[in-house]
Structures are given as structure tokens and as C-alpha cells.
Amino acid sequence: MKIAVIGASGNAGSRISAELARRGHAVTAIARNPGRIAAQANVTAVEGDVLDQAGLARLIAGHDAAISSVHFTASDPVRLIGAAKASKVGRYLVVGGAGSLEVAPGVRLVTTPRFPAAYKAEAEKGGAFLDLLRGEKELNWTFLSPSALFTAGQRTGKFRLGTDQLLTAEDGKSWISFEDFAVALADEIERPAHIRRRFTVGY
């Protein structure tokens, strides 16, 4: 498939681009500074601005899928969704956050007392992005939330999937590596199971 990755130079975006490329997909890696994207087979780096809705729509037009892997506080979900719709891309997938996951019925992680203040603005904007997507009727969107700790690690290919509830391991830890997150997202693109839905991944 031909897949565009918006924010391909970031922690998650770079792993997603690499995972898709190693599976043989043609990746258009979009970044504000394309020089930061590592050279690799099946990856074409291009310059793009997440705030330029028309320009972004032109870049992702003609792709089977587009993935948004950008910080919520450094982008505008209305423009991103608008670009995806204008491009007529087959699928639009978003690297989400854990803050909008539920820790109890109707209780989002971001609203709990121990949620780190430094990440609250980003988490709240991520939840707003998800809410906007849930109101979309024509866009084939998917929102993948990582677990609470989203960090560099190993590509194991062994993880659990969930829906709207935060996944926690037996030791109480809630985490997923960038590498295994990329595996879960690539699997979803190849075998769609969450059209117009959010899901989550964790150990």
C-alpha cells in the first residue's frame, strides 16, 4: 500500500514509518524538517506543515492511508481532519494519547488526581481530537491510544489490544514501546478491525 505518515521524524512517527517500510509498503514520510528522517528503502521524505490544511491535503492525496503522528498542542485537529477529508484518502489513522482512556466507567485518565500536570494540556487536546473524530460520518478514521507510559523499547510483537479502557499489566504497570505500537498500527492498516473506532495497545 501507499501510506503517508504525518510527523514522520518524531518518536512514534519514525518507528511507524520503519515498520511499514519493512513490510514493503511505500511510505511518504512527511515532516517539517525532512532532513531528520533516516534514509531507508521504501521511504520518501517530503516537507509538510501540519497547520497548512490545503498543502497537507495535496501531500496525502492518492494514498491508501494517512497516519497523523503529531503533538496535539502543536497542531489543529480541525485542519488535520479537514486535510484528510479533502484528500479523499482511504483511511485516516491517528496516534492518540492515553489521557482519554477510561480508568473507571466514564472517568478519563486525564481527570484523575495523579495525572502529571506537565502532560495535561496535551492529553486534553487529544481527548478533544477523539471527540471530533467521533462526530465524523464520512471519514474512515481510527484512533490508536498507547498505554500510560509510551517509550522507546523493543519490537516484540507481543501485546494486548483493548478499546476505551486503560490496559494495565499484572504488575500494575501500563506501558507500550514505540516499536510495538508501530506493529499494532501497521497490523490495523493491513487487517482493518477498528473503522471509526478508538482502540488501545499495551503489555
Image (spheres, rainbow, N blue to C red):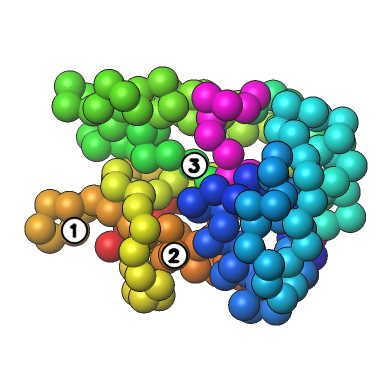
Instruction: Compute the Cα span from label 3 to label 1.
Output: 20 Å
Q: Quadrant of the C terminus?
A: bottom left
Position above or below: 179 against 139: below
Instruction: Compute the Cα span from label 2 to label 1.
Output: 18 Å
- Quarter of the view holding residue 154: bottom left
Where does label 3 land, which residue? Answer: 96
Residue 72 in sight in this render: yes
Instruction: Name which residue type carries label 2.
Output: Glu
Label 1 element class = loop
Tell me whether circle 2 and circle 3 mark residues in contact (CB < 8 Å): no
Q: Residue at x 89, y 42 (%)?
A: 58
Label 2 element class = helix
Instruction: Name which residue type carries label 3.
Output: Gly
Where does label 2 land, which residue? Answer: 179
Bounds of the magenta segment:
64-76
Instruction: Compute the Cα span from label 2 to label 3.
Output: 15 Å
Labels 2 and 1: the sequence-earlier one: 1
Tell me whether circle 2 and circle 1 mark residues in contact (CB < 8 Å): no
Position above or below: 126 against 143: above
Frontmost of labels 2 and 1 is 2
Q: Position of residue 79 (x, y in %)?
A: 73, 26
Of residues 34 and 26, which is closer to you in this image? Answer: 34
Residue 71: in magenta span: yes
Instruction: Name which residue type carries label 1.
Output: Ala
Labels 2 and 3: the sequence-earlier one: 3
- Give the side of residue 200 with respect to residue 67, left or right: left
Q: Residue at x 35, y 53 (%)?
A: 151
Where does label 1 land, which residue? Answer: 169
Frontmost of labels 2 and 3 is 2
Residue that sits furthest to the left in the current view = 171
- Dot 2, crowdedness within 10 Å: few (<14), some or many (≥20)? many
Label 3 element class = loop
